[in-house]
Amino acid sequence: MSWFAKYSRSSIGAKHVMAVSGLLLLLFAVVHMLGHLQMFGGQDMYNKYANFLQSLWEVKWPTRAGLLAMVLVHIATAMSLVAKNRAARPVGYAVYRPVRSTAAGRSMILTGLVILAFIVFHIVHFTLGQVQPGVFHTLDAQGRYDAYSMYVYGFQNVGLYAAYLVGILLLSVHLGHGAASWLQSLGFRHPKYPYDKLGRLTAVVLFVGYMIPPTAVLVGLIKLPGA
Ligand code: HEM
């Protein structure tokens, strides 16, 4: 077995792998969220941005492959840690009264599974265009792929808005806990610094940042061109 296989199967190695893969996914989530705020700049600004990203295949495909690899590594390592924990305590506690842990920390597996389902749905919706096929990959007045209108049609639909609200809420709780705990896993945590506050702040920023443009669409502040 190579040193890396041995290391990543040890408890500390698995914690490090969870922390690094989780951090890279968190960075992607922040960058993706910032990109969508350009919906407030109008159709031209958002479509310029979306078409620029789509045309950079040298960046697009390695990013897609990297994200998929990170998600698979993160899930496989989480499953192996859960299996180890169960093997170490085959009989549950008679009375379970957690002392230091938070609800967000204890529900990481549940929120993680819902996020996975949400991301699959999201890719079927916006990358494969199967949820609203009639508004997928239409062209704007300049002949560009009209990501702006696809976005607006998406969140004018209350059911889709509600699905994203739940998905983003759980994603924010999950990544908020992750943002505070990766420092502990990598050994950077010190009682002097307020990591729990960092976690809560990350959760709020992600939730508000992701949900502001869809909410603006739902209430009619962001509209289809000419509407
Ligand atoms: C309100 C929340 C979100 C909105 C409105 C949104 C919107 C979009 C849109 C419009 C696309 C297609 C871009 C294009 O085809 O040019 C996209 C792709 C994508 N989104 Fe999101 N997104 C949201 C949340 C998330 C979250 C939380 C994640 C994961 C952390 C995520 C991961 C992805 C991925 C992996 C892609 C595929 C990129 C590709 O095609 O290679 N999104 N998103």
Image (spheres, rainbow, N blue to C red):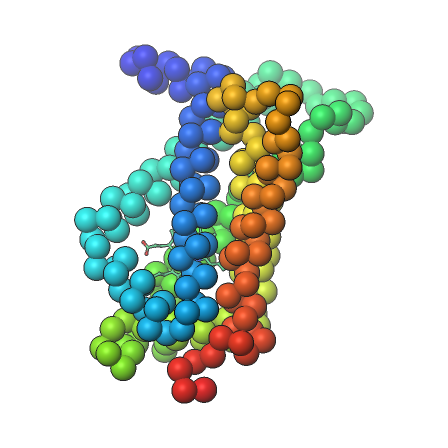
Which residue occupies 34% across, 61% down? 127
- The answer to whether residue 125 is seen in the rendering is no
Ligand 1: which quarter?
bottom left
Which residue occupies 45% across, 15% down? 10
Which residue occupies 57% across, 53% down? 207
The quarter of the displayed image where residue 131 is located: bottom left
The quarter of the displayed image where residue 53 is located: bottom left
Q: Quadrant of the N terminus?
A: top left
Seen from the viewer's position, the closer of residues 99 and 222 is 222
Q: Quadrant of the C terminus?
A: bottom left
Judge whether 110 appears above or below 1 on screen: below
Point out the residue furthest to the right here: 95
The quarter of the displayed image where residue 162 is located: bottom right
Residue 211 location, x and y as percent? 55, 60
Is residue 124 rendered to the left or right of residue 216? left
Residue 6 location, x and y as percent? 37, 14
Residue 69 location, x and y as percent? 34, 38
Judge whether 3 appears above or below 150 on screen: above
Which residue occupies 32% across, 12% down? 3
Judge whether 195 appears above or below 152 on screen: above
- The answer to whether residue 12 is seen in the rendering is yes
Residue 203 location, x and y as percent? 59, 46
